[in-house]
Image (cartoon, helix red, strand yellow):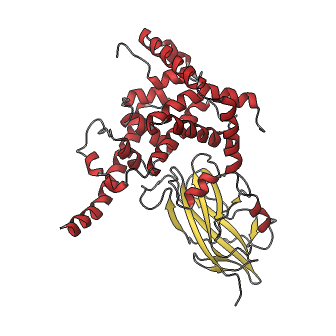
Amino acid sequence: MADRRLTDLELERWLADDLPEARRGAASDADRRRLDELRAEHAALLGAVDVGAELRAIEQRIARAAPPPRRFARWTWLASGGALAAAAAVALLVVLRPGGGPDDGPIYKGDIALQVYAADASGSHRLDAGATVQPGDKIRFGVHVAARGYVAVVGIDGSGAATAYYPFGSREPAAIAPGGDAVLPGAIALDAAPGDERFYAVFAERPFAIDAALFAGLRGEHTLAGLTIAEVVLHKKTSRF
Amino acid sequence: MSRNDGDVAELYRRHAPALLRRCASIVGNPDEARDLVQETFARYLGARGWRDGGAPFAVLYRIATNAAIDRLRRRKTASEDALDPDAHVGPPREEPRRIDSLHDLAFLTRGLSEDELTVAVLYHLDGYTQDGIAVSLDLSRRTVGKILTRFEQHVRKRAKRAELPAAARSASDG
């Protein structure tokens, strides 16, 4: 390759108006010839797609990725500061699962722990993993992280329906800092969907999407790279007897 | 579309060709590459603050690389059982050993962040030098070196984990 000073990736950035001027100035004649080749290739690639159709398909994907709204009606979001007092001493009760499952290398940047608290007549108490809960039980979440980043708490019920609980109904995680008050604002009342309820605290150093891809990954359908996940499973009884 | 259609169309026209090339080079199929580019834009536009996040190229490129590698992993044409991580582990060297099998790279990069995966793919698949990666991604040479070292450690760990099942398989075969 004769006198190339810029990589192809830099040239692609150039075509996207993303390459700093200083690097553009460093281009050799060979770089400029390659730039012309890439420009022609880009034009051919764009000419081969219907941009309008692609944009519509992208918008449909965004709409499909939104958390299913039907769950919002089945769960009741309770005002924060209500039934549960913030638990002070918090012990960990979770499975710590780095993104992607047990065979994937752990992601050590920023461990995360998820706690679940229940409220009853006697006050609030921490639920152990595997605890049995019932429809109507009110719970809230606590999250501890070891690094600054972004966190979401989501749940997948026994029917496979997924819901974003924190931030509630959101498609984006909330910023979180290590330490501080671990109990998240708000509480939820459990609905009558039968089976185990799986709650996940998902953490990353950068914002991520709370979307269908995330939920599919939590169901084990694919790897969730770059995320650190804590999981609590609760068993829901639909009858008190 | 709640976003400004013109802005999104411009964003697409400006970046889609590079993303199509990236994805096609990994999955080897233009239709699948187009699908992955749709997925990439959907993830990018679906995230809050895409308009305020600075230059989108790097973010889109990382998402596309990650999505394409993830697609490879989910293909059923080859299984992880066929992977021999030991083949990619050698004595410490100044330059990390290159992995030239796309299939192996797809499995060996499982669990890496999007940044780490992007660097690993540029190095191992595209044959970029560490300096080339650094200037292309606006990273320091040192950061690229650290990421590749972490990747090599990641591969070693996977090789170690593979030792026991491989030994068990040998024993049962024998």
**Quadrant including the N terminus of chain B:** top right
Answer left or right for B76 relative to A121: left
In this orientation, does residue A76 appear?
no
**Quadrant including the C terminus of chain B:** bottom left
Q: Position of residue B173 (x, y in %)?
A: 21, 66
Q: Residue at x 28, y 45 (%)?
A: B88
Q: Position of residue A93 (x, y in %)?
A: 56, 72
Q: Position of residue A23 (x, y in %)?
A: 50, 18
Answer left or right for A23 relative to A239: left
Q: Residue at x 47, y 32 (%)?
A: B139
Please tell me in which quadrant of the rendered image residue B164 appears. Answer: bottom left
Please tell me in which quadrant of the rendered image residue A75 appears. Answer: bottom right
Q: Position of residue B147 (x, y in %)?
A: 41, 41
| Relative height, residue A105 to residue B31 (above, below) | below
Q: Residue at x 34, y 45 (%)?
A: B152
- Residue that lies at the very extreme toward the top in this rendered image: A29
Q: Residue at x 60, y 21 (%)?
A: A17
Answer left or right for A145 relative to A59: left
- Residue that lies at the very extreme toward the bottom in this rendered image: A241
Nearest the camera: B77 or A22? B77
